[in-house]
């Protein structure tokens, strides 16, 4: 079903045509309503409902399979080792250049994943909150590099992810305002 060159048959990466990928949806029903979908899109986003059905729905199905398998493995490991700690969250990261649709992708996947059985809790945390505050970016001469790796407080981001994976509670993510282009204090 997938397309690979003969010398790539042991390559773990697969390539599917759009039609092949869309067929993986099988009979999975679309769980987003058209009105709900329009609220998930960014203002200038070209994402349409057909693309959600053909690309994102099969992707959410595959991610749901991964999450379920990871949770079952973690549960079996805890049973075997006699560990009584909490379930570890499954974290999905979406990367890409500025203005390529990461936020829309994340919102659509969040909505689709939250509808899979057994109705997982799906939170969305943007990396914008982990940018250095505007004053730091200006002081360090990084305003023109905003969004590049050096403009992020990576230590704070890694600490946040570690706290989430460790099951600490409460865990707070900084909030970024696209109105002020800065971190919102005490949010």
Image: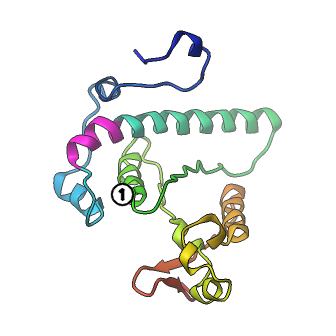
Residue 58 among magenta residues: no
The residue lying at 39 percent from left, 49 percent from top is 109
Q: According to the image, label 1 marks what residue? A: 104
Judge from the rendering whether residue 50 lies leftward or rightward of residue 182; answer left or right: left
Q: Is the stretch drawn in magenta largely helix, strand or loop?
A: helix
**Residue drawn at (22%, 49%), measured in percent from left and top?**
48
- Asked if residue 29 can be seen in this view, the reply is yes
Number of marks? 1
Q: Which residues are magenta?
A: 48-57
Determine the residue located farthest toward the right in the rendered image.
81
Q: Is residue 170 visible?
A: no
Q: Quadrant of residue 77?
A: top right
Q: Position of residue 186 (x, y in %)?
A: 57, 88
Q: Quadrant of residue 82?
A: top right
Q: Is residue 55 above or below residue 39?
A: above
Here the colouring is rainbow
Q: Position of residue 135 (x, y in %)?
A: 61, 90
Look at 31% across and 29% down and name the residue there. 18
Q: Residues within 10 Å of mark 1 (few under 14, many from 20)?
A: many
Residue 115 placement, left or right of 51: right
Question: In screen coordinates, is 136 left or right of 22?
Answer: right
Q: Relative to residue 146, is residue 113 depicted above or below?
A: above
Q: Position of residue 55 (x, y in %)?
A: 33, 38
Q: Nearer the viewer, residue 167 or 54?
A: 54
Residue at the spot 47% in from the left edge and 38% down from the top edge: 64
- Residue 142, located in which quarter of the rendered image? bottom right
- Above or below, 34 relative to 72: below
Quadrant showing the N terminus: top left
Q: Position of residue 114 (x, y in %)?
A: 40, 50
Q: Nearer the viewer, residue 17 or 130?
A: 17
User: Element type at marker 1?
Assistant: helix
């Amino acid at each position: 079903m997938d397309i690979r060159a003969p010398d790539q048959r042991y390559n773990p990466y697969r390539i599917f045509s759009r039609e092949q990928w869309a067929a993986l949806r099988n009979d999975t029903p679309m769980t987003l309503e058209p009105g709900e979908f329009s609220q998930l899109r960014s203002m200038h986003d070209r994402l349409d409902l057909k693309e959600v059905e053909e690309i994102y729905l099969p992707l959410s199905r595959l991610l749901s399979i991964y999450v379920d398998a990871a949770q079952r493995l973690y549960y079996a490991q805890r049973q075997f080792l006699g560990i009584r700690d909490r379930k570890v969250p499954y974290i999905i990261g979406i990367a890409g250049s500025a203005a390529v649709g990461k936020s829309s992708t994340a919102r659509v996947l969040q909505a689709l994943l939250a509808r899979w059985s057994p109705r997982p809790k799906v939170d969305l945390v943007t990396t914008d909150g982990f940018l250095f505050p505007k004053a730091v970016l200006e002081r360090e001469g990084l305003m023109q590099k905003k969004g590049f790796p050096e403009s992020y407080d990576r230590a704070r981001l890694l600490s946040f992810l570690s706290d989430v994976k460790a099951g600490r509670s409460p865990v707070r993510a900084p909030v970024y305002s696209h109105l002020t282009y800065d971190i919102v204090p005490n949010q």
